[in-house]
Image (tube, helix red, strand yellow):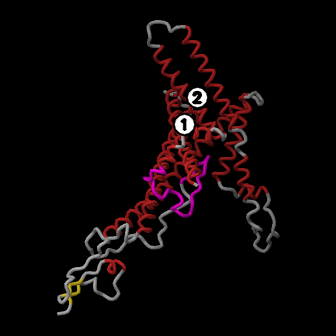
Amino acid sequence: MSSISFPGHASSSSSQHDSLYPLSFDGSGSNGFQMNPLSAHPPRTPRTSTVSSNATVYSPHVYTTKDEVEERPTDIEEELPENEDDPAKAEERSRVQAEDVWREIVTTSYGRDKALKLMQYSMRVYLLFHYSIARRLPVKAPSWEGELSKRLESTVAGLSISRRSLLLFNWLAPVTAILSARHTSPSYQQEDASKVVPPGPKPLLHTFLHASPPVLLELVQAVADDVATFSKLGLLGKRTGERAGRFADWCWFASTLVGLVENGVERSIIINSRKAVESRLFTESMNGATAKSAPRNAKIDDKELRLLERQEYWLKVQRTKLLMDLVFVSYDVFRLNRGKEAVKTFAGLASALLSSSKLYDRHRNTLLKALTF
């Protein structure tokens, strides 16, 4: 008998896995059982992968928020460094100081708004505890404490006006997005299919009526916020400002609900993609693939998995921030009074911390990439 072939391993139409793990017994030779010396696993029967070869496990159109959009490269290898454990890479990361990140944050109006929001609600939390404790003390508080409280209250009111002023003219962004869509299509068709308007820009009314509802909602909210801010500054009447502020609160409430729905959809996409990558990695490990036998596939899958986990983490942070905003604005929309001051104060501080952490992480990654390249 020249040889004994085992099923699934001696076939001429063997798979790539079989070529990596030849298994035969030659009675006339001295080799005996042969195994791939680079493998750390014994040969196993190949299993059919549950992931389709055409399945898309990475979507670049997720992980966006209303105020910021994070661009993602098409090549996953560009998103994460080659070796995070490299001492040289660790030294470069240590060169990015916190003050450098905050310097980049406050260069934008959105970053200054978040920095002032942290200051504003930190002071409100202090005042909340101060007045709560002062009411329970049997002795009268010193005069300097009363003066400090008055100064903090004045600072909180000033920071609120400053933040409103920083966010003026935010309606320019949705208007630009709507008008840019006016020139994307060379022509459009009227209700009568036989009459087609010659190529050219669409009418302005048609453009606004066919704009995306979230963009229109952002536009009317920004306009209402500006009217309320001008009223606070004394340019418009108080009644007009109150009506505009209440309408802006309703718009904020609706946009927050829309954001929660979008966040849920994006998280489901990320979770499905992560499960697909984990399934592929598990299948490769069960098939006996190692870092030496399939280096590029294993590296790309590992990087993709880490990227998806990072996206899922920040989507959870964004969901919590949206929930805090929903609690905050619900007190104004539905005119709730029970525990209003305490709930709005802690919800505002939590929202400021979560949004600032995301902004800090984005600017830190930008500085890291600038040092790398």
Q: Residues within 10 Å of mark 2 (few under 14, many from 20)?
A: many
Left or right: residue 293 compared with residue 79: left
- Please name the residue that numbered disc 2 is placed on: 120
* Residue range corresponding to the magenta coloring: 63-89
Secondary structure beneath dot 1 equals helix
* Residue 194 pos. (x, y %): 78, 74
Q: Is residue 246 above or below residue 341?
A: below
Residue located at (56% from left, 53% from top): 372
Query: The residue under label 2 is which amino acid type?
Result: Gln
* Residue 229 pos. (x, y %): 71, 33
Q: Is residue 77 magenta?
A: yes
Residue sticking out furthest to the top: 139
Helix, strand or loop for the magenta stretch, by majority: loop
Q: Is residue 16 above or below residue 369?
A: below
Residue sticking out furthest to the bottom: 1
Secondary structure beneath dot 2 equals helix
Who is closer to the viewer here, 173 or 190?
173
- Pointer 1 with pointer 2, Cβ within 8 A: yes
Residue 45 in sight from this viewpoint: yes
- Please name the residue that numbered disc 1 is placed on: 352
* Residue 66 pos. (x, y %): 60, 48
